[in-house]
Image: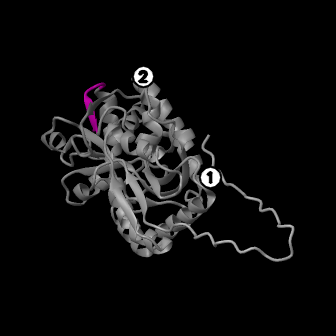
C-alpha cells in the first residue's frame, strides 16, 4: 500500500541557562521545483500541468519547471523521479500507465510504484469516451450495443494501444454488454480517426480531450462517456455505466507523486499548492473547457488519491484478465 511518511524530530534541551544560537532552517522550497512528465510535450498530462504550473509557482514562491522525459510507456520518466534525491525538488506527474497498468502488464519493472512513490494528491481526471462516425450504423449508445449484439465480432473499436486504459475499457464494455468487440490498437490517441471516417472502423475509445473538438466540429460523435455519472460538458451523452460497465470503466488520472523518503514539509506544501491550483477559477475554466474533471477536495489529499488509485488498479486487473493479457 502507498504510505505517507513524516518524520518528527525531538530536540534535546541544553543543560545551561543561556540559550544557544542556531541557524534558522530555510523553508522548502529554496529553488525551482521540477515536475517530470513521463510523456511528450503537448499530450494530456503535459497540457494540464502547464495550465496549473503558474498557480503552483505563485503558491510556492519558486518557479515550477515542467520536464518531459519520455520512453517505455512512461517508465523512463517515472524511474528518473524514483532515483532522484527525496528532497521535494523532483516530482512526478503520474498517470494510469506508469502507476497502474505498466506494473500489471510488464514482467520487469525498473521500480515498484507502490513502494517507491508517495502520492501527493490528484489534480485532474480525464474521462474516456466512445466515439463513432455520426453517419455510421450506430449513431447512439443504445444502437451501438444492439449492433454489437447482432454482429458478434464485426464491430471494431480502436484504442491508443494494447494494454492502454482505452483498450481495457473496450474489454469491460464487451463483458458488461455480452458482446464480442474487435479491438484494433493504434500507436497514439486519435489514431483511428481516419479509419472511423472511412468506415473501416466502427469507433474508438479515446480521451475526451482528443475527441471533444472533433465532436463539437461534427466530424465524430461521442456516444458514451466512461464515467458513473454524466459529464457536465456533455450532459446529453449517456455514460457507459448506463449499459452496465462498473463505474463507467476507467478514468485517466493526473496527479503528483514524490520519491519515497521525501520529508513531510515538501509533501504538505506541494499538496496545498496543488489544491490551490485545482480551486483556481482560471485553471478550472481552461481544464474543464478541454473536457476534464477537477479533483474533489478529498481526492486532492494523499489518502483520497490512494483510494482512487486502488480502485483503478482493481478495475484494470479485471479488464486485463478479460483481455487475456499476460505480463511480458
Residue in front for this viewpoint, 223 or 32? 32
* Coordinates of residue 215 in the picture (x, y in percent): 25, 56
Mark sitting on residue 303 = 1
**Is residue 8 placed above or below 315 in the rendered structure?**
below
- In the picture shown, does residue 113 fall above or below 44? above
Residue numbers of the magenta segment: 152-159
Residue farthest toward the left in the current orientation of the protein: 198
Looking at the image, is mark 2 or mark 1 earlier in the sequence? Answer: 1
User: Residue placed at 29% from the left, 53% from the top?
Assistant: 43
Secondary structure under tag 2 reads loop
* Foreground pick, 318 / 99: 99
Residue 290, image x, y percentages: 33, 62
Element marked by disc 1: helix
* Residue 197 sits in quarter: top left
In which quarter of the view is residue 183 placed? top left
Q: Residue at x 36, y 59 (%)?
A: 66
Circle 1 Cα neighbour tier, 10 Å, few/some/many (<14 / 14–19 / ≥20): some
The C terminus, quarter of image:
top left
| Residue named by callout 2 | 326
Amino acid at each position: 500500500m502507498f504510505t505517507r511518511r513524516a518524520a518528527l524530530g525531538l530536540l534535546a534541551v541544553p543543560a545551561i541557562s543561556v540559550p544557544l544560537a542556531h541557524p534558522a532552517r530555510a523553508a522548502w522550497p529554496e529553488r525551482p521545483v521540477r515536475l517530470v512528465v513521463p510523456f511528450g510535450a503537448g499530450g494530456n498530462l503535459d497540457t494540464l500541468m502547464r495550465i496549473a504550473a503558474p498557480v503552483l509557482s505563485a503558491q510556492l514562491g519558486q518557479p515550477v519547471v515542467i520536464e518531459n522525459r519520455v520512453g517505455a510507456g512512461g517508465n523512463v520518466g517515472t524511474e528518473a523521479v524514483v532515483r532522484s534525491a527525496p528532497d521535494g525538488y523532483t516530482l512526478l506527474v503520474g498517470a494510469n500507465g506508469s502507476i497502474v497498468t505498466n506494473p500489471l502488464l510488464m514482467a520487469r519493472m525498473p521500480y515498484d510504484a507502490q513502494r517507491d512513490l508517495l502520492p501527493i494528491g490528484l489534480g485532474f481526471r480525464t474521462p474516456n469516451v466512445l466515439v463513432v462516425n455520426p453517419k455510421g450504423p450506430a449513431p447512439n449508445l443504445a444502437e451501438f450495443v444492439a449492433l454489437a449484439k447482432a454482429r458478434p465480432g464485426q464491430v471494431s473499436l480502436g484504442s491508443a494501444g494494447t494494454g492502454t486504459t482505452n483498450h481495457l475499457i473496450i474489454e469491460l464494455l464487451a463483458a458488461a454488454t455480452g458482446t464480442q468487440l474487435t479491438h484494433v490498437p493504434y500507436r497514439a490517441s486519435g489514431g483511428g480517426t481516419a479509419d472511423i471516417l472511412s468506415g473501416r472502423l466502427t469507433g474508438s475509445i479515446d480521451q475526451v480531450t482528443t475527441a471533444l473538438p472533433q465532436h463539437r466540429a461534427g466530424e465524430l460523435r461521442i456516444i458514451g462517456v466512461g464515467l458513473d455519472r454524466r459529464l457536465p460538458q456533455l450532459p446529453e451523452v449517456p455514460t457507459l455505466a448506463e449499459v452496465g460497465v462498473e463505474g463507467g470503466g476507467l478514468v485517466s488520472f493526473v496527479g503528483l507523486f514524490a520519491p519515497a523518503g521525501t520529508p513531510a514539509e515538501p509533501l504538505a506544501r506541494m499538496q496545498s499548492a496543488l489544491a490551490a491550483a485545482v480551486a483556481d477559477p482560471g485553471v478550472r475554466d481552461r481544464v474543464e473547457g478541454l473536457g476534464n474533471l477537477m479533483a474533489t477536495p478529498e481526492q486532492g489529499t494523499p489518502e483520497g488519491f490512494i483510494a482512487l488509485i486502488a480502485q483503478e488498479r482493481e478495475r484494470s486487473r479485471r479488464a486485463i484478465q478479460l483481455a487475456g493479457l499476460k505480463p511480458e
